[in-house]
Image (cartoon, rainbow, N blue to C red):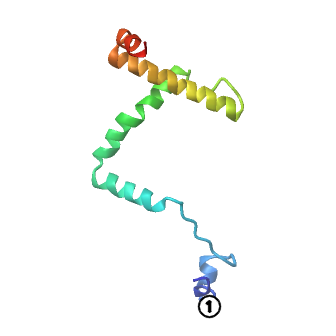
Amino acid sequence: MADDCSGCALKPRCTSVERRFVQRHLYEDALQRMNARVEADPHLMRQRRCAAEHPFGTIKRMTAGGRFLTRGLTNVKTEAALSVLVYNIMRVINLIGPQSLKIRLA
């Protein structure tokens, strides 16, 4: 409660403001559960890096260091979406081959 600190003799040593605010992330409980899982099994973070972060590194390499060529939020969103589309097409070609992709798209 906000009244708890008002009568405390140690309040000047804790803070000089009239009120204190506590902020909490909207999904703090989910973040704490995720951190607990990672601490319990550190291998999970290594697995995540291999599976989830590889596409971002590849896209960054494809786009000359991750710099956008366009300006403005709408244009940058479009450029990012096209980069992801190109990555996904390249991934499909590497997985099933160009001839198989042509057959499946026809």
Residue 41 point in image, percent of width and height: 27, 51
The residue positioned 71% from the left and 29% from the top of the image is: 71
Number of residue marks: 1
Say whether residue 83 is left or right of residue 12. left
The quadrant where residue 36 appears = bottom left
Residue 44 point in image, percent of width and height: 31, 45
The quadrant where residue 2 appears = bottom right
Q: Residues within 10 Å of mark 1 (few under 14, many from 20)?
A: few
Residue 11 point in image, percent of width and height: 61, 83
Where the N terminus falls, by quadrant?
Answer: bottom right
Q: Where 57 sits versus 12, above or below?
A: above
Q: Is residue 67 visible?
A: no
The residue positioned 45% from the left and 20% from the top of the image is: 89
Q: Residue furthest right?
A: 72
Q: Residue furthest front?
A: 106
In front of the other: 13 or 31:
31
The residue positioned 68% from the left and 29% from the top of the image is: 75
Say whether residue 105 is left or right of residue 85. left
Amino acid type of the residue tagged 1 in the rendering: Gly
* Residue at numbered disc 1: 7
Q: Where 23 sits versus 88, above or below?
A: below
The quadrant where residue 63 appears = top right
In front of the other: 53 or 13:
53
Residue 33 point in image, percent of width and height: 38, 59
In front of the other: 68 or 85:
85
Q: Secondary structure at mark 1?
A: loop
